[in-house]
Amino acid sequence: MTDKTLEGRVAIITGGGRGVGRSIAENLSAQGAAIIVADNGGDVDGSNEDAAIAETAAAALPGPALAYTKSVASPETAQEMVETTTAEFGGVDIIVNCAAILRDGLVFKGSTEDWDAVIETNLSAAFYLIRATTPVLRQQFKDNRGSGEAYDWGRIMNIGSTAGLYGNFGQANYASAKAGLFGLMRITALEMVRSNVTCN
């Protein structure tokens, strides 16, 4: 029997329809959290979106879940997703930035289009969601949302890569995005600690 330690918590998981993101969604749902599976179902390079990916993943979860099938790589989408989440579940406690695409190419051959697409999905999307969610997390801390004496925690998790630390041949765009994600993570942790929110 799984311990329902996340009962009453709400998690948004980008890239939650497949792979690592889906495993995280399944794990958090099994522990009692309500889940927003945010995944446009695109191929590894971001093309050929398929809404059924997120819808199928959300439907298979044991607890309450919603599918969000728009690309997370826009500030408007991030804001809309957070507003939808709080309207449906009353708040948000956990975000997991797992969405990523790959468009490999040597640095002297890589296209601007591929660079922009990878940076937007793998780095900017995380910033957009963090920016949209942190005011909610801060307000929940001030309002003492939750069943205890105080709102005791919020969690922001970013899925990194050793490519962001050490580089990887043919992945200038991907490695740069992941390196940027480490920087975003550290600054967010510093700025949100007063609201009992961690960022890793």
Image (cartoon, rainbow, N blue to C red):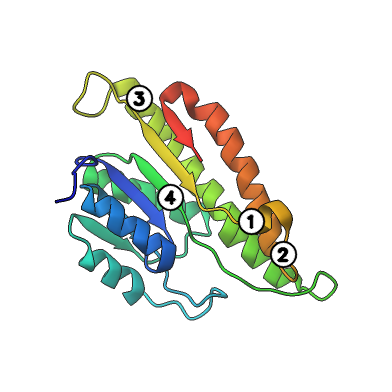
Q: Are marks 1 and 2 in contact (CB under 8 Å)?
A: yes
**The disc label shown at residue 96, or none:** 4
Disc 3 designates what residue? Answer: 141
Q: Amino acid at mark 3?
A: Phe
Q: Is residue 56 above or below residue 1?
A: below
Q: Residues within 10 Å of mark 4 (few under 14, many from 20)?
A: many
In this view, the residue in front, 29 or 101, is 29
Relative to 83, 113 lies left or right: right
Q: Nearer the viewer, mark 4 or mark 3?
A: 4
- The residue depicted at 38 percent of the width and 34 percent of the height is 154
- Indicate which disc, 4 or 3, sits on the residue closer to the N terminus: 4
Q: Nearer the viewer, mark 2 or mark 3?
A: 2
Answer whether residue 186 is visible to the viewer in this image. Answer: yes
Q: Are marks 4 and 1 in contact (CB under 8 Å)?
A: no
Disc 2 designates what residue? Answer: 168
- The residue depicted at 56 percent of the width and 28 percent of the height is 190
- Indicate which disc, 4 or 1, sits on the residue closer to the N terminus: 4
Q: Amino acid at mark 2?
A: Asn
Q: Amino acid at mark 1?
A: Thr
Farthest residue to the bottom: give it: 48
- Indicate which disc, 1 or 2, sits on the residue closer to the N terminus: 1
Q: Quadrant of residue 174?
A: bottom right
In this view, the residue in front, 190 or 143, is 190
